[in-house]
Amino acid sequence: MAKILLVEDNEMNRDVLSRLLKRRGYELFFAEDGESAIQMTLELAPDLILMDISLPKMDGNEATQHLRAQSACAHLPIIALTAHAMASDRDKAMAAGCTDYETKPVDFPRLLEKIEKHLKQVKP
């Protein structure tokens, strides 16, 4: 069972995504800000991170940059989740080190395809 860290400060978004992912058999862990995301990633070694970009304390782009600086996280799939749908927002997330990008409201089938694709690339 793949471990996914869901980094999301909005309780409703966290609840909806967690129910969807649990039904698919993923083991879920949660962080509500960028600082907690870094700490939990280093402690739990998840297989994939769903990273909200607009977070308190430290945003998702900055948290991703910190994670990418850790050798253990260099190839960890990180999918950015954001309500910001401009091309420049996507570019910032990808430049920070995100592996992929998904806008909110989330298209669940498309997100699941991305999750499965990235998990297969890490664990063939």
Image: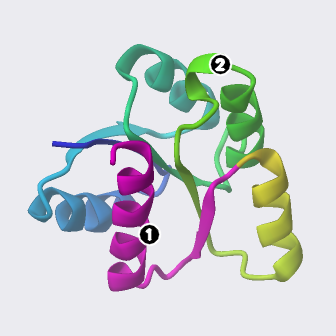
Task: Report the span colored magenta.
Answer: 98-124
Question: In the structure shown, which secondary structural element does the residue marked by tag 2 occupy?
Answer: helix
Q: Residues within 10 Å of mark 2 (few under 14, many from 20)?
A: few
Query: What type is the residue that disc 2 sits on?
Result: Ser
* Residue situated furthest right in the rendering: 88
Residue drawn at 37 percent across, 38 percent down: 47
Between the C-alphas of marks 1 and 2, the distance is 23 Å
Q: Is residue 43 magenta?
A: no
Rendering quarter of residue 122: top left
Q: State the residue position of label 2.
A: 71
Q: Is residue 112 left or right of residue 24?
A: right
x, y percent for residue 11: 37, 56
Q: Is residue 45 visible?
A: yes
Vertical order, 48 against 65 (above or below): below
Q: Residues within 10 Å of mark 1 (few under 14, many from 20)?
A: some
Q: Nearer the viewer, residue 11 or 105?
A: 105
Q: Quadrant of the N terminus?
A: top left
Q: State the residue position of label 1.
A: 114
Question: In the structure shown, which secondary structural element does the residue marked by tag 1 occupy?
Answer: helix
Q: Earlier in the sequence, mark 1 or mark 2?
A: 2
Q: Is residue 78 left or right of residue 63?
A: left
Rendering quarter of residue 66: top right
Residue drawn at 72 percent across, 81 percent down: 85
Rendering quarter of residue 3: top left
x, y percent for residue 94: 77, 58
Residue drawn at 72 percent across, 44 percent down: 59
Q: Is residue 90 left or right of residue 34?
A: right
> Are the residues tagged 1 and 2 within 8 Å (C-beta)?
no
